[in-house]
Image (cartoon, helix red, strand yellow):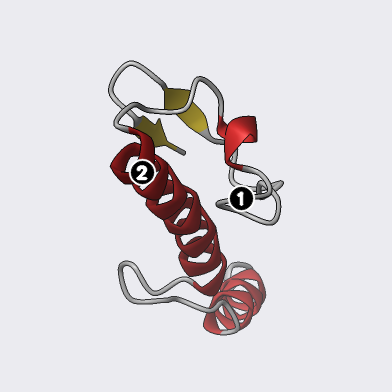
Amino acid sequence: MTKYALPMICISAILAGCAVYPVGQDADGLNLRRDANHVMMAVEAWHHDKGTFPRTLGELVPQYLPALPREPELHYHPADGSLAF
């Protein structure tokens, strides 16, 4: 056995245990996207009801959202109602 055989076997075993999700199917990523989508739907509902976008996301609580999500970190632009995370 060469001096590299054992380290390569260990590395292969470690990598074999790693979970790989198909693109867009990571469970944590899906949860973050879901929470951001809830906020975006609330922004759209506000816009539909009032004809403007809220100045801050905090204005959506409690009428349009029970609370803002802690994650993902949201970047809101009130000029056009866009949201990024």
Furthest residue in direction top, as rendered: 79
User: Which of the numbered marks, if any, corresponds to residue 25?
Assistant: none
Crowding at label 1, few (<14), some or many (≥20) Cα neighbours within 10 Å? few
Q: Alpha-carbon distance for marks 2 and 1?
A: 12 Å
Residue at 59% in and 46% down: 72
The spot of residue 18 in percent (x, y) is 57, 77
Q: In this view, does 7 lie to the left or right of 8?
A: right
Crowding at label 2, few (<14), some or many (≥20) Cα neighbours within 10 Å? few
Residue bearing the label numbered 1:
63
Q: How many labels does the image show?
A: 2
The spot of residue 6 in percent (x, y) is 66, 77
Q: What element carries label 1?
A: loop
Residue at 45% in and 76% down: 20
Name which residue type carries label 1: Gln
The spot of residue 14 in percent (x, y) is 63, 76
Name which residue type carries label 2: Asp
Residue bearing the label numbered 2:
49
Is residue 1 visible to the viewer in this orientation of the structure?
no
Is residue 11 visible to the viewer in this orientation of the structure?
yes
Q: In this view, does 17 lie to the left or right of 30?
A: right
The spot of residue 57 in percent (x, y) is 56, 33
Q: Is mark 2 on a helix, strand or loop?
A: helix
Above-or-below relation of 49 to 20: above
Q: In which quarter of the image is residue 4?
A: bottom right
Q: In this view, does 41 lie to the left or right of 59?
A: left
Closer to the camera, 34 or 3? 34
Residue at 66% in and 44% down: 61
